[in-house]
Image (tube, coloured by chain):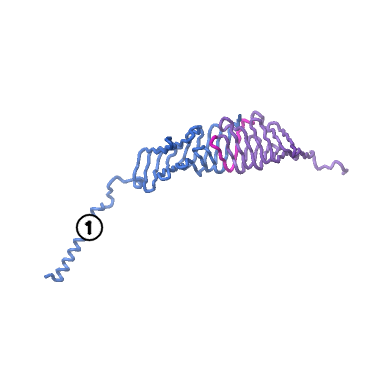
Chain colours: A blue, B purple
Amino acid sequence: MLTAGKIRLLLALAIVAAVVSLIVMSMKKFPTHGQSPSAVATDGERQAELTLRGIRVNESSNGSTRWLLIAEKAEYDTKRSQVKLADVRLSVVPVDAKLGELVLTSPTATYNTGTKDVNLAGGVKARSSKGMEFTTRSVRFIGSHGVVTTVDPVRFTDDLLTLEGNGMEFNVATSALKVTSDVTATYRGGKSQ
Amino acid sequence: AVVSPAQRSDLPIQIKSNELSSDGAGKVATFSGSVVARQGDVTIFCDRLVVHYGAKERDISKVEAQGNVRIVQGNRQGLAGRALFDNQAGTIVLEDNPRISQGSDTITGKVITFYLNEQKSVVTGGTDRRVEAEIKPKGAGIDVGTKP
């Protein structure tokens, strides 16, 4: 007959068995601290789920390329639909090819896969096919509108003109340019027809 | 320093303003907001300055000044509602209530042409506006008519 003592003993045994099995399961699931299954991941790699060597993104319409983005290295972050780029080259081609291609380069950039915007940073240089050179700190290329814009100080130079100011908006399709404040333009030689 | 004609059109033109916008074809650039344009001994102040390029881009063909135009060259000053600067001809044509003063003398008319290389101005009247000049004799202030 099962006396109260025997029941208590059985219960104690059952509890001990349960605790032991719990311990065994948890040891299997979580390796002990300090043991990393692979080489220590850098911050970037731990966030980025995909690191690519060399990336090429282009947008075209009516069969011709509107802009082409090339980078040496890209870290793709799906959570934020963003690609962090290094050693970047963005060339933008207006519909009217006569207006010439604009090529922008910068050490770093971020490409948003949703909006198709590219934020170039770290010192941006640009050159138009007509020889106009342009420098600023950072630039945002609004892919959907084909507009290059910045709020930073800008400087444009070519053989006849030096133009400086703060803030700029350049429409690639029409080559229309706006410098938004503190403008100084120097036309060298001032020769005219 | 007075600038010779040959030198003038080769001198750089510097323009400062609040804002600049240029069209895509590279034909026109508009400077707006507290505009100051300087070439050698000539300075143009105005609200808006429209630079027209010649056949070759960035080569200035003419410059239109609009709104509160003031032109200063040495002791000569021109005021007008608008003015047209022709770099090749070395002239500035003032219209819309133009007035020119040199020292204490003042002349108004319908159109005033400023010759930048010759220290000369030509004032023309029109049907609705005659030429008026106010010349203050040198040594002004002495009353010639009465005995001391």
Residue lying farthest front? A62
**In percent of the image, x 40 and y 40: which residue is there?**
A86
The quadrant of the rendering that contains the C terminus of chain A is: top right
Percent of width and height locating residue A125: 47, 37
Give the extent of the magenta segment: B8-25
- Residue hosting label 1: A23
Of the pair A99 and A182, the residue shown nearer to us: A99
Residue A162 visible to an observer of this rendering: yes
Percent of width and height locating residue B38: 63, 37
Q: Magenta span has B10?
A: yes
Say which quarter of the image contains residue A90: top left
Say which quarter of the image contains residue B36: top right
**In percent of the image, x 17 and y 64: which residue is there?**
A13
- Residue A186 falls left or right of residue A106: right
Percent of width and height locating residue B102: 73, 38
**In percent of the image, x 66 and y 39: which residue is there?**
B82
